[in-house]
Image (cartoon, rainbow, N blue to C red):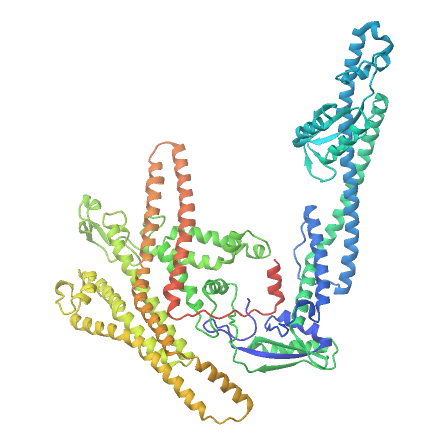
Amino acid sequence: MSENGGTSMDLLRSEAMQLSQLIIPIDSAHLAITYLGHLGLIQFNDLNAGKSPFQRTYATQIKRCGELGRKLRYFKVQMSEAGLEPLARSGTGSDLNVDDLEVKLGELEGELTEFVANGEKLQRSYNELVEYQLVLQKAGEFFHSALRKATVQQRESGSGHGGESSEAPEAPLLEEQELNSDQYKQVKLGFLTGLVPKGKSMAFEKMLFRVTRGNVLLRQSFVEQPVVDPASGEKVIKNVFAVFFSGERVKSKILKICDAFGANRYPFSEDIGKEAQMMTEVSARLSELKITIDAGISQRKNLLHNIGQKYEQWNLMVTREKSIYHILNMLSIDVTKKCLVAEGWSPVFATPQIQEALQRATTDSSSQVGGIFQVLQTKESPPTYFRTNKFTSSFQDIVDAYGVAKYQEANPGVFTIITFPFLFAVMFGDWGHGICILLATSFLLIMERKFSNKKLGDIMEMTFGGRYVILMMALFSIYTGFIYNEFFSRPFELFSSSAYNCRDPSCRDATSVGLIKVHNTYPFGVDPVWHGTRSELPFLNSLKMKMSILLGVAQMNLGIVMSFFNANFFRNGINIWCQFVPQIIFLNSLFGYLSILIIIKWITGSKADLYHVMIYMFLGPTDDLEENQLFSGQKVIQLLLLVLAFGSVPWMLLPKPFLLKSQHNNRQHGQSYATLTDESLQSEINHDSHAQEEFMFSEVFVHQLIHTIEFVLGAVSNTASYLRLWALSLAHSELSSVFYEKVLVLAWGYNNVIIRIVGVFVFICATVGVLLVMETLSAFLHALRLHWVEFQNKFYEGDGYKFNPFSFTLIANEEE
């Protein structure tokens, strides 16, 4: 949601909200809701929740808009079938009102329906003629073949059957001839021709044979090209058939079988002269139909093109109109039937803008009475509304995916803008890979205007929506890559030469004792000399593990501090003293102390074993530290911190339930003697009393016990969870090194161009597929977990609900 209003944007706390009531005259209600939809700063409540959609006042208008939407969807289907796309939505609105648009769409639908019906009728006729032409060709071959055979047999039979020569062409089509006792009796055959789908031809033949008991002759010819079936309009591979039979009863059975198998029948003449004439007529008719169909398609495309130019404007207009009537149906009609009453949530800063919209609606509609805006007092929890822009909205979506902030609860989104990409970069740090991601993101930013008005695939849509998150991830990855001094796993002396040098030629294969310091300390990041030595992995292991603990403890402390600001904002002193204070003491007595030891060890260069220090801080707190002592008085401080850590646990557990019970008893005691001044105060107190009677000390105590156990155990597990920063950073570095040395360098060692090209190709594919895609996704998900679980659970409840105003902009985005 874009930023509105003139006040400054504040992401830490959600906007102050108010429940307002609007009293709008009926004659200006439609215009008032339209202006409020353009403003997009009020969330209407449904005051007619008990009524069905058909019982509401504006059900007829919504049905009318639904009919207009149906016509527009019909137009879009027709445009899609014609291969046309609606033109992009322009900024100017339609010059028609809803009544004129209804008439216009009705005329266009009638015209388009006529085009479609005529086109389908002509196409069906054309398809039938194509099939008829095939029947004339293929069936003609049957009869010509039979005629040739009959002529040959007639010549061979000689004069013995000379009297029967006139009907000889029929004879070869009979499998048997019946001989009467007195004379030969020639049977005259009937026949049917047509086309049957090839997949059904075998079953068709078997059915004919069974039903007629073999008293038919069937000839089939395969059609090479599929034909469009006139009935279904689909392309089907078919066979041309000719079935010869004797008798009307057999004919009726064959007709029923043809209908059952979807066989299309066409007439055929035995006369060769008529056959040639029919072929000529069919060809001429096909040419005429083709010209007519093409002309109709051209006219239909022109009509759809004209519709496509205005389609998006009309669709937006109908969508807005329907949404306006949906809102009007949520309003209650006053008994006088002269005004509508609306209730809804709106930001406090939007009050002047809402009043100005009501006043403008009154003026533009020439209404005699103006709209009234007034604020209502309520105990309902308001919705949460953060004013974001295109940069901050994607970070806010990351937080909202976990849970929407409670009203005016501290918003983790403020810190997520920096901490999320930074923690990602700690795991992904390589400035070469960071530059690759930056280039990909730069392309999305350059194409931002084009892609924002275009439908993208699911994955591309998600990537484009988070383009600014990816941009920050890339920038921070370049920064941490400079710190790690890694460019596709290779170090560079960017800021100065290395501070160390080899004592002898074999030191590259030895440990760090083979290095001597010859220059000043490397000014920024890891000294490049560490890369490639045997001590690289132990050194980076120690560095990244300790760094992970420091970052984790710092972020968890930030979460606990935010719980203080939440409690202070909501004036909850119990949470400050019985939750924030013991939690901050417990966490820092253990892991805060560990962080300080890490820093001291880095500064002093001590060889103390911090594992030993932390373990024996619990197992032997009074034992001497000996070589593990980092500063004087360390044992006393450790004893004090241990006492504070153990003392903070009952501090978290016990006082809060008893203080809450005491507050409950005091309120009930005070209310029993309250002086009631009016009925509203009495009802309010009665409501509070009923709510407070439900106070159960056992439930509160168990809840606090669970919360205490969860925090104590979570302090350990959450700190350990931050070690994923170390693990994934090391894994990314090692994978990158393996791909470089075992693929690129190995292939480049061969004096063969093909091997080198294949090696470079495999290296690029591995880098892009594994490091830039899979590793990016892995680091993203781990950074997401660190924020949702380790950071936000310290202070963020996330049990609110999002402000969902009536806004034409949001409606348009949902439509897209």
The x and y percentages for residue 409 are 45, 73
Toward the viewer: 477 or 320? 320
Q: Quadrant of the N terminus?
A: bottom right
Q: Is residue 181 above or below residue 603?
A: above
Q: Residue 502's spot in the image, x, y percent?
A: 20, 48
Q: Residue furthest front?
A: 181
In the rendered structure, the answer to whether residue 448 lies left or right of residue 82 reads: left
Residue at 41%, 70% (x, y): give it: 796
Question: Of residues 773 and 587, which is closer to you in this image?
Answer: 587
Quadrant of residue 361 within the rendered picture:
bottom right
User: Does the rendering let one see residue 310?
Assistant: no
The quadrant where residue 240 appears = top right
For residue 282, above or below residue 298 = above
In the displayed structure, 277 sits above or below 424; it is above
The foreground one among 760 and 55 is 55
Q: Residue furthest top?
A: 159
**Where residue 69 sits: x, y (%)?**
70, 59
Mark count = 0
Coordinates of residue 243 in the picture (x, y in percent): 75, 25
- Quarter location, residue 257: top right
Left or right of 666, for residue 507: left
- Residue 693 seen in render: yes
Quadrant where the image shows the C terminus: bottom right
- Residue placed at 28% from the left, 53% from the top? 497
